[in-house]
Image (cartoon, rainbow, N blue to C red):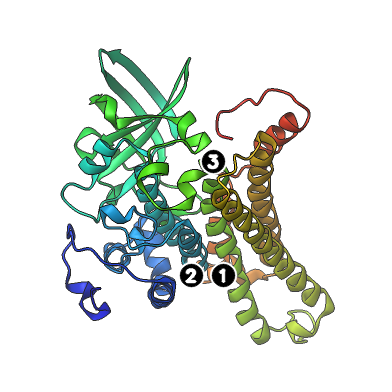
Amino acid sequence: MVPTADLAELPSGTRVQETFGVDEFRRRLAAMGPLVKDRAPEAEANRRLLPETFGQLRDARLFRVAQPPMFGGVGLDIDQVYEIAFELGRADPSTGWNAAFYALHNHQIGMMPKETQEEYWAASYDVQMATASGVVRAVFEDQGDTVLVNGEWDFASGVDYADWLQLNRLTEKGAQQMLLHRSQFEIIDNWRTAGARATGSNRVRVVDARVPPHRTLDAQLMANGDTVGRQLHPSRFYKLPIFPWMGYVITCAIIGAAQGMLDVFSDQAPRRREMTTGDMFVDRAANQLRIAEASAEVHAARQIHAGDVRLFHEWADADYRPTMLERAAVRRNAAYCVKLCLNAAYRLFEVGGASAIYDHNPLQRYYRDISVMSHSIAVVWDPIAEQYSRVLWDLPPKSYNL
């Protein structure tokens, strides 16, 4: 194991193998929290993760927590990716979002053909991938064994630090995940948004990129937990349908952000006075009720998530194949947690007072970030709730991502 004091001296691109347990992981994660929180305003102005923050998270091996051990993973799992999303999201929602995605994606590469995994980590164990999910224009041409790709895609979170890019292709036979190298795409700086600004979720442009067959994966294999990761790697999550548990990575970043907003509100409230009466803000019953209800909503979201994680472990340990309704119910739960956090954020911002609208007050940034992140298609309530009800009533699903 590499001593913590030496981590900052390790260059990017290192192939040093390092393992550590949950306690050491949590110590490293906790050490990053105050730094991330202090840098949040600068990261937002930068509209991407700060280079020094990215470097420290990388060198602390936090992006490797769910990475396959045979390719430099530290021996932990998606459970710790959820912790990254929550704890760093609590300090700065955008940083929690990006860090969790980097860690998630390195787990996800373990589902690709082994040849692809070896190619992905050929030069370094510290490699990152971004996913571009918003189709602006997409043209796929099958040319023998390869696919020629042209187009533009939005919402590529953290793409500025990405060595690889993942795209989704819908065909008559179903969905495919496709992997492109950094040399095959261009970043278009268009991420000017109401919130989540530091995620740097820019547009990408692909021109005449050829994707060989080993860089393509049938999404149905991921949906059913039948990728090569099941045989190659020890993580229990490779035995599970990906879409139910993957959605919680986003949800946990939003839950962490809501908790962070609660933290800020709780800290500010004792110093405030009511403008019209001069009374202490915390003495007013209405204010007491607001924070109690908001904290209960965030607590409820955390408990729903914890319950589903226990369910994931039970399914994987028994090698159980969850039914379509069980999958849809978990996706419903993850989206409902986001609804709870949105309610809590609005409740706190509404009673945050006139000072909450100023840029220097972090309440407004948490509120904007939570609002924007809740627009992710992976956690938007209406289509996910519709899918659950369709499955419940024996209607055919309208999407492959169950």
Q: Residue at x 68, y 63 (%)?
A: 303
* Crowd class of label 2 (few under 14; some 14 to 19; many from 20; radius 10 Å): many
The picture quadrant where one finds residue 376 is top right
User: Which residue is outermost to the front?
Assistant: 318
Position in image of residue 142 (x %, y %): 31, 14
Q: Residue at x 63, y 50 (%)?
A: 334
Along the viewing direction, whichever of 332 and 117 lies nearer the viewer: 117
Q: Which residue: 68% across, 33% down?
A: 387
| Residue 262 on image: x %, y % | 63, 71
The amino acid type of the residue labelled 1 equals Gly
* Mark seen at residue 260: 1
Type of amino acid at the residue the image marks with label 2: Ala
Residue picked out by circle 2: 91
In the image, 42 versus 151, the foreground residue is 151
Q: What secondary structure is marked by label 2?
A: helix
Find numbered disc 3 in the image and state the secondary structure of the residue it sits on: helix
Residue highlighted by disc 3: 243
Q: Kindly tell me whether residue 372 is visible in this rendering.
A: no
**Number of residues whose C-alpha sits closer than 10 Å to that of mark 3, classed few (under 14), some (14–19) or many (20 or more):** many
Q: Position of residue 117 (x, y in %)?
A: 27, 42
Q: Residue at x 37, y 53 (%)?
A: 102
Inter-mark Cα distance, 3 to 2: 26 Å
